[in-house]
Image (tube, rainbow, N blue to C red):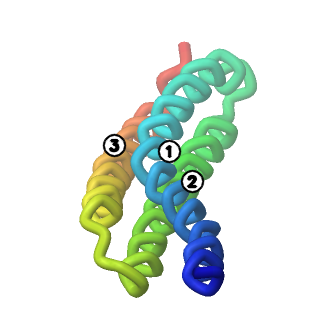
């Protein structure tokens, strides 16, 4: 009985780690995108006064990296977990995280295109 219990406890840490990664893949992309939108809006006045948009572009670049990292972490957590057990919930969460990541990467790229196109609009 002790050997069975010990094996379950050893797998619990990896199971919790993958749960956090799966939740991060679902929740981090929309939060990062909303943060990018808010921070970029707050930086517009400063950027116009200093005639540079590098700060706004840096925030967008960082957002892209954060969203991509969350998606990769969620997808790899499902792959690690799938090697051990067949867990339908983890597979569903990984797929949802991947779709969320792709959606918010596309939105971030669309916003970046508009920021670059409108960089000389300061009045």
Asked if the residue under mark 1 is in contact with the one under mark 2, i.e. CB atoms within 8 Å, the reply is yes
Q: State which quadrant residue 111 falls in.
A: top left
Q: Is residue 102 above or below residue 18?
A: above
Considering every residue shown, the one lying at the far right of the view is 50
Residue drawn at 61 percent across, 27 percent down: 39
Say which residue appears at 58% left-offset and 81% top-offset: 1
Q: Image quadrant of residue 102?
A: bottom left
As helix, strand or loop, the secondary structure at mark 3 comes to helix
Foreground tag (2 vs 1): 1
Q: On the rendered image, what quadrant is the C terminus found in?
A: top right
Q: Which mark is residue 28?
A: 1
Whether 52 is drawn above or below 58: the answer is: above
Label 1, residues with CA under 10 Å away: few <14, some 14-19, many ≥20: many
Q: Earlier in the sequence, mark 1 or mark 3?
A: 1
Extreme residue in the front direction: 1
Q: Residue at x 47, y 68 (%)?
A: 72
Residue 34 on image: x %, y % = 48, 30
Q: Give the mark toward the camera: 2 or 3.
A: 2
Position in image of residue 74 (x %, y %): 45, 63
* Residue that label 3 marks: 107
Q: Is residue 52 visible?
A: yes
Left or right: where 115 falls relative to 100: right
Q: Which residue is mark 2?
A: 66
Q: Nearer the viewer, residue 14 or 37?
A: 14
């Amino acid at each position: 009985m002790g050997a069975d219990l010990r094996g379950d406890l050893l797998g619990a840490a990896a199971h919790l780690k993958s749960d956090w990664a799966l939740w991060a893949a679902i929740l981090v992309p929309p939060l990062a995108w909303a943060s990018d939108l808010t921070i970029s809006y707050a930086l517009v006045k400063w950027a116009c006064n200093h005639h540079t948009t590098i700060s706004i572009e840096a925030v967008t670049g960082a957002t892209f990296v954060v969203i991509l990292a969350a998606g990769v972490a969620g997808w790899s957590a499902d792959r690690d977990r799938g090697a051990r057990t067949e867990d339908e919930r983890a597979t569903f969460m990984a797929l949802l995280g991947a779709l969320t990541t792709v959606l918010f990467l596309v939105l971030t790229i669309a916003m970046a295109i508009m920021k670059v196109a409108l960089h000389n609009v300061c009045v």
